[in-house]
Amino acid sequence: MATKQFTYTARDISGKTITSTIEGPSEQAVGARLRAGGLTPLSVVPAGGSGLNKEIKIPGMGEKIGLKDVAIMSRQMATMISAGLSLLRALTILVEQTDNKALAKVLGEVRSDVETGRSFSGAISKHPKVFPPIMINMVKAGEVGGFLDETLESLAQTFEDEVKLRAKVKSAMAYPVVVLVVAVLASVFMLLFIIPVFAKMFEDMGAALPAPTQFMINLSGWLKIAIVPIIILIVVFAFWWRSHKNDRWVRERLDPIKLKLPVFGALNKKIALARFSRNLSAMLASGVPILQALDIVGEASGNIVIERATNDIAESVRRGKSLTSPMVNSAVFPPMVAQMMAVGEDTGALDTMLSKIADFYDQEIESTTEQLTSLIEPIMILFVGIIVGGMVITMYLPMFSIYDQIS
């Protein structure tokens, strides 16, 4: 019999009210399952509702589930399981206490799947947009090895480090982006409202205009006509970029450029190497097979160039060769990374060496972002000064010729 999704409200043995979702063939079957699980069902209705009771969702406006939410969830679950709570009880507590409603709903579905006999890794694998592949595979290894709490603890630490990494990058990029936006808006404002006033004044005077001034006036006239189409194109591109920025063909063209950018190229490479090292260390320490781990960490690095290099490493391992032999001839991995991984491979402490590499690049990223922040601030101030000051100067150039004629 086909199963449906139901939303239920029930009371547990302690008197607490629980609201979640569960799959079943009918309301009666769901009620029977709840009673068998020690719950007293208060209401069981088809999920989603209908008519006026149906929840209205606007695409892109719902509550998002970020990596920070998953990290907190992993930390809390690791603590509860290590304290002796069952997996189902831990999931029930998380459903009730998680502030993020979207994550609470997903956890409710995971709990329902676990109640029906599905493994925890199998349950979270049904939600790939919430739980990344590294988590699914590490949880699977933890279930097989009987150390799920340690795996979740390692996952929480890995995700927390990734959140810190993203915060560092955002802090480095925030200032130049804000200044650039202000400079563009100031330039557009001057071209649309200030320069036309000067243009009308120069036209009334009949003065001969220097080439820079004439160019700015022509640009102002063109922008008046093109401003609406430009805004439409920007909005359309923003929506398109949001949907397609992770497409393979887009990344194949942009990711190599990211590593070759002046100043920021080195930072992007360090970020990708830090992710590669940290994720591979966590997966190997959790008992994930190395070929399976390599397939995942390449994609998780966030750069297709690193992913291709990782695929070469995986192919080398499949052929029975050393893990680090293709890294020596690769332009992606620095010699230091290859040497430390070779030592770790020889000593059987590869996960430890990878963790040290990740820590090293975390420090490098922090140092680089601090240097960039101190360097970019005066450069951006100079940039804004040149843009705005240049436009002001071009508007005052005809004044000197008019003054000379009057004299």
Image (cartoon, helix red, strand yellow):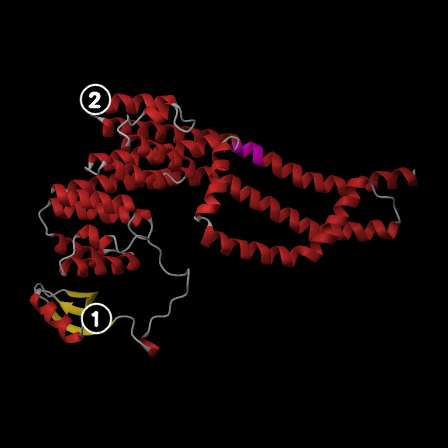
SS of the residue under disc 2:
helix
Image quadrant containing the C terminus: top right
Picture coordinates of residue 157, whole percent (x, y):
25, 39
Q: Amino acid at mark 2?
A: Thr
Evaluate if marks 1 and 2 touch, with contact meaning CB atoms under 8 Å apart: no
Provide the secondary structure element on which disc 1 rests.
loop
On the picture, is 371 further left or further right than 300? right
Determine whether 227 is above or below 83 in the image: below
Quarter of the image with the N terminus in it: bottom left
N-terminal of the pair, mark 1 or mark 2, is 1
Q: Residues within 10 Å of mark 2 (few under 14, many from 20)?
A: few
Question: Magenta stretch: residue 353 in it?
Answer: no
Residue under pointer 1: 2
Residue 78 in view in this figure? yes
* Residue, disc 2: 347
Residue 183 locus on image (x, y percent): 60, 44
Residue 140, x across and y down, in percent: 19, 46
Closer-to-camera residue (180/307): 307
Which one is nearer the viewer's eye here, 196 or 116?
A: 116
Q: Which residues are magenta?
A: 376-380
Relative to residue 92, is residue 39 depicted above or below? below
